[in-house]
């Protein structure tokens, strides 16, 4: 070797060693978890020193509370929708109303509400005092953590570890968590097995102090258990009047006292019904006037036939029939009180067993007032020992109705699985196809427990008549009248698989007739879905529209 080659080889060897060591260090650094911590003010979306984050079961709210004059206030919209629906701001009277299970309490809104940049905030103290949710006020950073009474899945932590923002060792640390702590499991199915969104090796969790993040699977004990959230008990217990057996409720359209008197005759060929719902209360004015047809003789007859009576209130058969009229009535505190007092009083006087609210002119703008009406009616019913049920069209049409809040205070929520196509629809179609019923039940069950949900099905169809490119005309027909039309017109009946209904069509001169038929076969298909969903029962609109063979079908599925 030449003398001057030795230093060169040494330098090259050193370079190789440095490169190998550097590569090893890089590989090690990639394998090691990061110790970097998440900026929690950014995580909780805190943008000023007066902000207070809000954490609910749904996650970290986009809305934030505020410190105002040294006190904490929470966005009224968030409180009413996500924390405590029992707190209602009655703007016309300047009153905060708290509805407990058995009473209605008023507070001067001037002491409980603040407005900042056009947004209303309610005092944290009032929320904390009158919420059955468990609420914790935590610092560093300032946040309100809300836990409600819902069921959830949980696991124990078996090692001291970290909760990370993402499912990766290089993801920033949200918080440390100690062995023996319990965390809520978020990416798990109803049966306790991993959900479709689960990341291999990691589990998404929620901690008691309000962090949503990921823990490595090795740090959990692997046993998912069902837990029941606890009530703070501050608001009081919402008791419910529930029937032990499946409900078979038929709506009875009562238009006068003669209809009441003919109840026994109307039931000559009916059996298996255990609740009858007569239309007895019709909204007539924005001041809360009602046409009232409650009748003690009717109740005595129904009880003699083995049925309870749930009197129906509606806002479309009386003199008042518009969204504007319904909102004007329900947004008035004194009118709500009048409706509750008059209805409960008349129902008790008649000896009936419950009330069903079927207000169908409720718009999205009116929904908060409607929910307050339901809360206040629930007080009247609970104190009087009356069952309370609420009718809603399918969520596809009425997502804004607040079914979870309805079922919190009322006994049953009814999903009206009909009027898929109605008078005025731009095209002809089924009143209640099977996919429509399935979707309505499924979407309702996302908010309402099956044991408290009644699926309502139709005993009527529509005969559609198209004469031009304009929207078709239609008229409602009961099952018997539909069969008579088919026979009189010699129309050919064919089964339509997708709708799960018999279908007829006929061209007669310049008019094209169509009908998706409700009959025992279509009821059979619907009742299979009701039974599979394990609903509390079924309701039917309306008595007198049916053929006698449907009662066997309904009873068989409710008894299975």
Image (cartoon, rainbow, N blue to C red):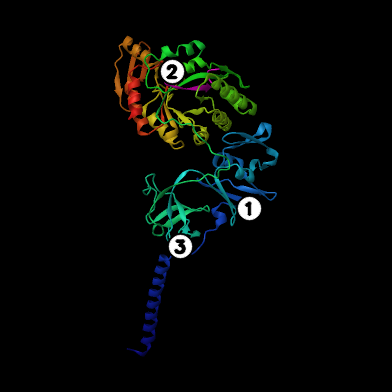
Disc 3: which residue: 160
- Front residue of 135/346: it is 346
* Image location (x, y in percent) of residue 511: 38, 13
Of badges 2 and 1, the one in the foreground is 2
Element class at badge 1: loop
Res 465 seen here: no
In the image, taking residue 318 as reference, residue 162 lies left or right, namely: left
Q: CA distance from mark 2 to mark 3?
A: 66 Å
Magenta residues, as a range?
302-318
Residue beneath disc 1: 48
Q: Residues within 10 Å of mark 2 (few under 14, many from 20)?
A: few
Query: Which residue was labeled with disc 2?
Result: 304
Residue 1: quarter of image: bottom left
Question: From where the camera sits, is residue 209 visible?
Answer: yes
Seen in the picture, residue 206 relative to 25 is either above or below; the reply is: above
Task: Indicate yes or no whether the magenta region holds residue 310.
Answer: yes
The residue positioned 52% from the left and 20% from the top of the image is 351
């Amino acid at each position: 070797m030449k003398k001057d080659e030795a230093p060169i080889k040494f330098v090259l060897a050193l370079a190789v060693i440095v490169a190998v060591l550097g590569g090893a260090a890089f590989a090690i650094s990639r394998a090691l978890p990061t110790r970097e911590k998440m900026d929690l003010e950014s995580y909780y979306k805190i943008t000023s020193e007066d902000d207070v984050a809000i954490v609910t079961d749904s996650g970290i709210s986009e809305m934030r509370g505020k410190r105002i004059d040294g006190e904490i206030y929470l966005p009224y919209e968030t409180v009413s929708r996500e924390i405590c629906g029992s707190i209602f701001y009655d703007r016309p009277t300047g009153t905060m109303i708290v509805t407990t299970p058995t009473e209605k309490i008023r507070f001067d809104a001037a002491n409980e509400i603040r407005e900042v940049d056009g947004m209303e905030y309610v005092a944290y103290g009032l929320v904390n005092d009158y919420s059955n949710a468990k609420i914790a006020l935590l610092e560093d950073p300032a946040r309100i953590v809300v836990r409600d009474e819902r069921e959830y899945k949980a696991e124990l932590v078996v090692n001291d570890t970290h909760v990370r923002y993402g499912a990766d060792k290089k993801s920033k640390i949200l918080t440390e968590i100690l062995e023996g702590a319990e965390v809520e499991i978020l990416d798990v199915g109803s049966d306790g097995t991993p959900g479709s969104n689960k990341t291999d090796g990691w589990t998404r969790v929620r901690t008691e102090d309000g962090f949503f993040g990921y823990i490595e699977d090795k740090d959990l004990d692997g046993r998912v258990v069902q837990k029941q959230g606890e009530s703070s008990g501050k608001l009081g217990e919402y008791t419910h009047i529930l029937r032990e057996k499946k409900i078979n409720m038929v709506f009875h359209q009562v238009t006068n006292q003669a209809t009441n008197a003919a109840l026994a005759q109307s039931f000559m060929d009916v059996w298996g019904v255990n609740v009858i719902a007569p239309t007895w209360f019709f909204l007539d004015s924005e001041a809360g006037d009602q046409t009232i047809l409650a009748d003690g003789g009717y109740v005595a007859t129904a009880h003699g036939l083995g049925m309870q009576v749930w009197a129906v209130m509606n806002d479309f058969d009386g003199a008042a029939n518009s969204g504007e009229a319904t909102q004007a009535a329900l947004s008035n505190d004194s009118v709500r009180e009048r409706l509750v007092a008059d209805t409960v009083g008349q129902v008790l006087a008649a000896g009936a067993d419950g009330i069903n609210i079927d207000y169908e002119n409720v718009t999205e703008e009116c929904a908060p007032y409607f929910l307050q009406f339901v809360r206040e009616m629930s007080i009247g019913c609970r104190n009087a020992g009356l069952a309370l049920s609420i009718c809603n069209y399918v969520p596809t049409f009425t997502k804004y109705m607040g079914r979870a809040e309805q079922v919190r205070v009322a006994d049953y929520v009814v999903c009206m699985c009909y009027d898929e196509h109605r008078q005025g629809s731009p095209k002809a179609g089924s009143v209640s196809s099977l996919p429509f019923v399935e979707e309505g039940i499924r979407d309702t069950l996302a908010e309402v427990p099956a044991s408290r949900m009644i699926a309502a099905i139709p005993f009527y169809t529509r005969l559609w008549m198209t004469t031009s490119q304009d929207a078709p005309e239609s008229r409602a027909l009961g099952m018997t009248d539909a069969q008579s039309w088919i026979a009189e017109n010699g129309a050919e009946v064919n089964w339509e698989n997708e709708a799960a209904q018999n279908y007829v069509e006929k061209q007669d001169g310049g008019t094209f007739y169509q009908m998706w038929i409700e009959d025992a076969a279509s009821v059979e298909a619907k009742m299979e879905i009701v039974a599979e969903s394990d609903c509390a029962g079924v309701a039917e609109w309306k008595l007198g529209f049916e053929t006698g063979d449907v009662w066997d079908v309904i009873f068989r599925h409710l008894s299975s």
